[in-house]
Amino acid sequence: MMPTTFSVGLTGGIGSGKSVVARLFAARGATIVDTDQIAHGMTGPDGPAMAAIRAEFGAQYADAQGALDRAKMRVLVFSDPTAKARLEAILHPRIRDAALAAAAAATGAYVMYDVPLLVESGTWKQRVSRVLVVDCPETVQLERVMARNGMPESQVRAIMANQATRAQRAAAADDIINNGGDLSALEEQVAHFHDVYLAFSAGTITIPSQRL
């Protein structure tokens, strides 16, 4: 079901620069609802999702502080698709409800949901007015993540293999930002789409009927 107020779903693969894009939109007055940040809060020490996670997976998946042992869970979900589905069944409804509550309290020009797995979730596209994908070549993704996180190439490729492909994200997108590495070009694209989204939000242009 489409929202009654204008909103954007922002997504992109690991290393695409989505977080940088979100900050640029925030600097221009958009309210950013970061679902990754919400998820971290849900799975932090004694977070609201931890009781359900311990009940489903066992106490060994919580660390000494009562937070999710992310490294241990990452190994499990990458090796067992059913575990991934079970974890998502716990987290996704809670994240969705918290994100919608944050959006209801937003004061920005429009709401932008930062959703790393927007395409993979299969439901976010129906909850936003537009889907904005941050895209870049896979070689750039690899280089950025390996440099940023110190991960070996094989581990980065394993993460990418569990995400939607560039083609799948492009198919789901209403708008695409190319973030191949030129910051000035990135800022120009953000400024352009921000103006477009302000116009959508103000009702001076209408959302194409096929998205309604």
Image (cartoon, grey):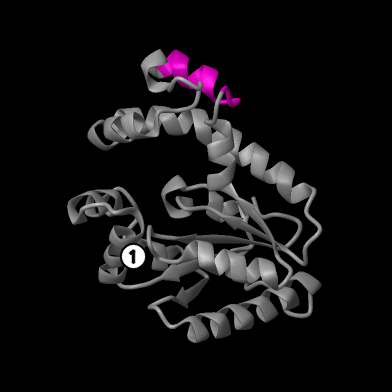
Q: Quadrant of residue 191?
A: bottom right
Residue that sits furthest to the left in the current view: 154
> Is 88 displayed left or right of 48 in the figure?
left
- Disc 1 marks which amino acid? Arg
Q: Is residue 48 visible?
A: yes
Q: Quadrant of residue 106?
A: bottom right
Q: Residue placed at 69% from the left, 80% from the top?
A: 195
Q: Residue placed at 45% from the left, 16% from the top?
A: 54
In percent of width and height, residue 164 lies at 35, 55
Q: Which residues are magenta?
A: 46-56
Q: Residue placed at 52% from the left, 22% from the top?
A: 50
Check disc 1 and report the residue beneath it: 144
Q: Is residue 53 magenta?
A: yes
Q: Residue placed at 52% from the left, 36% from the top?
A: 92
Our reading of the magenta stretch's main secondary structure is helix
Above/below status of 152 relative to 75: below
In percent of width and height, residue 25 lies at 64, 70
Q: Nearer the viewer, residue 8 or 4?
A: 8
Q: Is residue 58 visible?
A: no
In percent of width and height, residue 182 lies at 43, 83
